[in-house]
Amino acid sequence: MDSTQPELLRNVTYTELRREEIGAKFIVRGAIPSATAHREFIVPFVAAADGAGFDRYTTEGVIVAESAGDVDFTLYPSGLTKRWHVDGPFFLGKAGSNPRNEYPLLVPIDAAVLMVSANDLDDRNVRWLYVMFAAAFAFELARRYGAWYGALLLVLPQIAIEGEGGLLSAYSDIPLGAFIACAFFELIDGESPLRFGMWTSFALLTKSEGLPLTMLLMLAGAFVFRRRVALAFTTYVPALITLLMWRARISLSDENDFATLIFALPEHLARFLASLGAMAGQFIAFRDWGLFWLVVLVAAILLARRREWRPLALAGFVIIPMMILYAAIFAVTDWDMRVLTGNLAPRLMTHLLGPAFVLLARVTGGAPRASAT
């Protein structure tokens, strides 16, 4: 091979991959072979590069290395045919592609404020924000039911160590689960419809899954608060209108149109049953949850035997329809079933932790304490 031409590295291992800014360089850490006369190398990208912030059109790039061994080197993205310079409007900052264009903005705005304040766009600067969501969730559980319940949240494998959806992952599943939990706690208390509306509004603006979740909560709120639920709507309705108006004005993303696809569910009954089985399998997903969801299921059975219908009915009204809806949505997509059983189902179950902890606390003796005023 001509030493002036770049050598193709087929087995490069990425240990760090982040984009510093659109149209500029990427930082990659990898291993350069020691037995080579080349200083320029072509690095092929794989599908996993999409999740690291690369545009989906990126296929390969050129690196310039000073020496062999483990080094940090600058990677300049390129197109399929031109390997020697930044190619295409995306990398020149003239155009962008956002495959999550409809993602609610509450948490991203929080992160953006921190980035602007720090004058640094490195997303590692805001990861502590997501840790704080988990800590706040744990403190609220401890305040309401006792310290052991807060500690239990933080040692659940899905929360503590999972790379996708855990407290160090910078995913918004824990923030959504925390907001849903606080709204559910207000349902159980039945005291403040205004606080209930506030928590549901936060959940609505945190993740797309917040829309069906909060609609269920508002229906339950109408049962619990009766006419007083109007106070909850004073915060929830403006948040809902804002979300819908914003989505109507932005460009369409490449996300599936779930509202349309769901009507094709009868054509996907086999996948639906398989998806439903995967969601139900979370009750015995010991790798992700330990014994937590199995114990919650036992707690629900005990509450039924004791005829404590109110907390059981409220929790079931949220947990069961959402598990069915998540299974139905997955069934009408073309996603690989291994995605659901691998990491998606545990993330979705994180949204339902609040009702689950209420059931657990009612059976295990966690004494509910007065809510904050």
Image: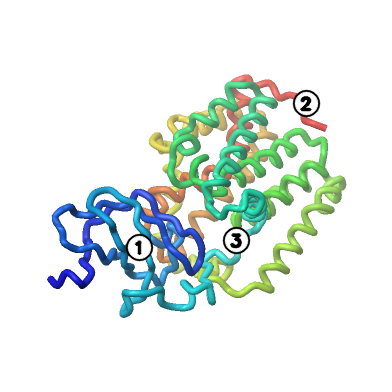
Q: Nearer the viewer, mark 2 or mark 3?
A: 3
Do the CB atoms of the residues marked 2 and 3 lie less than 8 Å apart?
A: no
Rounded to the nearest whole Å, what is the CA distance between mark 3 and mark 1? 22 Å
Q: CA distance from mark 1 to mark 2?
A: 50 Å
Circle count:
3
Is disc 3 in contact with disc 1, using a CB cutoff of under 8 Å? no
- Rendering coords of residue 97 (x, y %): 51, 71
Q: Is residue 87 above or below residue 328?
A: below
Vertical order, 308 against 221 (above or below): above
How far apart are the alpha carbons under marks 2 and 3?
Answer: 35 Å
> Of circles 1 and 2, which is in front?
1
Q: Quadrant of the N terminus?
A: bottom left
Q: Residue at (20%, 72%) from the top-left corner?
A: 4
Q: Earlier in the sequence, mark 3 or mark 1?
A: 1
- Quick check: marks 1 and 2 in contact, CB under 8 Å? no
Q: What residue is drawn where x is 31% and y is 50%?
A: 71
Which dot marks residue 47? 1
Circle 2 is placed at which residue position?
370
Mark 3 vs mark 1, foreground winner is: 1
Going from the N terminus, do you reach mark 2 or mark 3 first? 3
Front-most of 314 and 198? Answer: 198
Q: Amino acid at mark 1?
A: Ala
Q: Which residue is mark 3?
A: 103
* Secondary structure category for the residue under label 2: loop
Q: Quadrant of the C terminus?
A: top right
The local secondary structure at tag 1 comes to helix
Which three-letter amino acid code belongs to the residue tagged 2? Ala
Type of the residue with mark 3: Tyr
- 40 sits to left or right of 55: left
Question: How many neighbours does mark 1 have within 10 angstroms: few (below 14), some (14-19), or many (20 or more)?
Answer: few
